[in-house]
Image (spheres, helix red, strand yellow):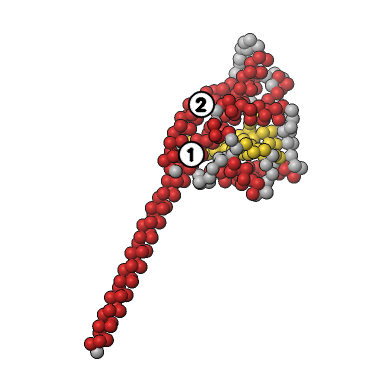
Amino acid sequence: MKMVAAAKLRKAQNAIITLRPYAAKLNEIMQNLSKSVDSPDENIYSAKRPADKVLIVAITSNRGLCGGFNINVVKRVISLIKEEYSSQYMLGNVKIMAIGKKGDEMLRAKGYAVEEAINDIFDKLTFENTVPIAEKLMKLFVYKEFDRIVLVYNRFKNAAVQILETEQYLPVKASDENEDNNGQDLKADYIFEPGKEEILESLIPKAIKLQLYKALLDSFAAEHGARMTAMHKATDNADQLIKDLNLAYNKARQAAITKEILEIVSGAEALKG
């Protein structure tokens, strides 16, 4: 299982490492565009509303045997519900979407209702297959079904390290790095061609869709890294267990031989007497 996970990790790792620079730059442009918009109505995806209705998207795996990979996401989701969105949850305004079978199973087992479960996306993880999920989330926000959508997932760092992320998906956050040390506004100044409306209507939705795809790719690579590490530890533990059992067996065998020798010697001495 470790070898299989390592082979899958290599492919998933190459995919996320290749995507990250593009996704990061596109996300930066999206945030700057959101801040450069004069009226909030011009960008429906960055409209700020009171977070009365919240959707938490828990991204886990379809399979286990990957250490604390899945339970960490579930714990973070429960922590968000109990601490940050407790008042909304008491009113029934916090919903959960589970992407990955394990998150769905664990949350239901702990008594949390999962509004929707998507388990087949990791069978063939491509941008095209991710788009329908992203479009659904975007519609839920635009039609005011939810005021805030949050992603909870594991970000891939390396084979041994996964970083748990809580990321606001919608509304789009405007860039907060547009001031210099003197507090001067350094907001990016764009020349829109052919026009601002066309740019906002095409670029920002694409960046939002790519953001979800990147989160899923990150989680997919992190899953294989966590499974490879878990199987490596399991192999080491099994090797150590075999050594301990061999030692215990040899000690028991030696004790039995010694006991038999003592019985023979004692019998011989008794016969001499």
- Where 206 falls versus 238 (above or below)? above
- Where 238 falls versus 175 (above or below)? below
Q: Is residue 167 visible?
A: yes
Q: Which of the two discs, 2 and 1, labels the residue nearer the N terminus? A: 2
Helix, strand or loop at label 1? It is helix
Disc 1: CA contacts within 10 A as few (<14), some (14-19) or many (>=20):
many
Residue 45 in the figure: left or right of residue 235: right
Circle 2 or circle 1, nearest the eye:
1
Disc tally is 2
Q: Residue at x 63, y 33 (%)?
A: 168
Label 2 amino acid?
Leu
The spot of residue 78 in percent (x, y) is 64, 45
The spot of residue 137 in percent (x, y) is 67, 30
Query: Circle 1 sits on which residue?
Result: 224
Q: Residue at x 25, y 84 (%)?
A: 269
Query: Circle 2 sits on which residue?
Result: 19
The spot of residue 170 in percent (x, y) is 66, 30
Of residues 67 and 43, the one nearer the viewer is 67
Disc 2: CA contacts within 10 A as few (<14), some (14-19) or many (>=20):
some
Label 1 amino acid?
His
Q: CA distance from mark 2 to mark 1?
A: 18 Å
- Where 126 falls versus 115 (above or below)? above
